[in-house]
Amino acid sequence: MQDNFAVYPSLKNMSVIVTGGAAGIGEQIVRAFVDQGAKVGFLDFDRDASEKLYNDLNHRLDFEICDLTQTDELKIAFAALKSKIGPPGVLVNNAARDDRHKWEDVTSEYFDQRIATNLKHQFFSIQAVAADMIKRGGGSIVNLGSNSWWEAGGGFPVYATSKAAIHGLTRTMARDLGPHRIRVNTVVPGWIMTDRQKELWVTEESLRKHRERQCLPDLISPVHVARMVLFLASEDSSMCTANNYMVEAGSI
């Protein structure tokens, strides 16, 4: 843990489930919760990456291999994690893929698959943990959105549609679960410099244009997103719900 980052006592021994936790932003979220002393479980479809993270963190967490687009698999994986780390007080809906696609090429089957990949599982993940949070008297659900649709970004219309819908999911579930002291918020990342982004889309020209759109000159790392997630998971944000929390360096 970096010395200048906050420690949240309310997260120590907290049971936390993170979807898509093996790599990228999800990996940093998992590492951040483990550093806080939380009881962490994550879901991912990539066994090699999951086992690598498990070993890197000296087995101080648990994971389940799962295709989140298959709701039956999702439910089984959540039940398995809960049996290992206990009923979760925190859910981080992180899993997604921002694959590029042309609107002209989108088929009905592709549309449905992208919605399942980027949106549907968030709802069913909430459904899988809500009863436990109600029973424990509260909790925090953090959904990962994207500023791609805020910026009217092109080249991935179904992805952008999925991410825009997450804001509606957050606000309606915040209303339904709020009486049980369950908070639901959206973290909105900008262009985060994950390994995948660097391999597929980062160029000198794209970085130059991106920096021009940001208010801050520095590039955003997955760690910055993880720190916002920690805050929203902790009791420090106990009166924050139904809102968007931007981690995009003031991008326009």
Image (cartoon, rainbow, N blue to C red):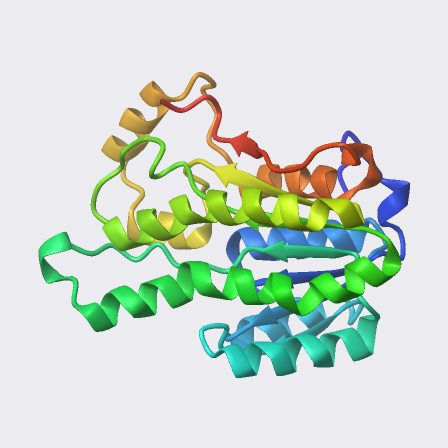
Q: Quadrant of the N terminus?
A: top right
Occupied quadrant, residue 41: bottom right
- Which residue is nearer to you in this view: 73 or 168? 168
Along the horizontal axis of the image, is 245 left or right of 248?
right
The image quadrant that residue 5 belongs to is: top right
* Residue 40 location (% of width, % of height): 76, 63
Q: Residue at x 64, y 44 (%)?
A: 175
Q: Is residue 71 above or below residue 245?
A: below
- Closer to the camera in the image, 43 or 219: 43
Judged from this view, the residue extending furthest toward the top is: 215
The residue under the point 88% across, 44% down is 10
Q: On the rendered structure, is 148 left or right of 134?
A: left
Horizontal relation, residue 179 to residue 10: left or right: left
In this rendering, does residue 162 appear at all? yes
**Front one among 21 and 164:** 164
User: Residue drawn 45% across and 73% down?
Assistant: 69
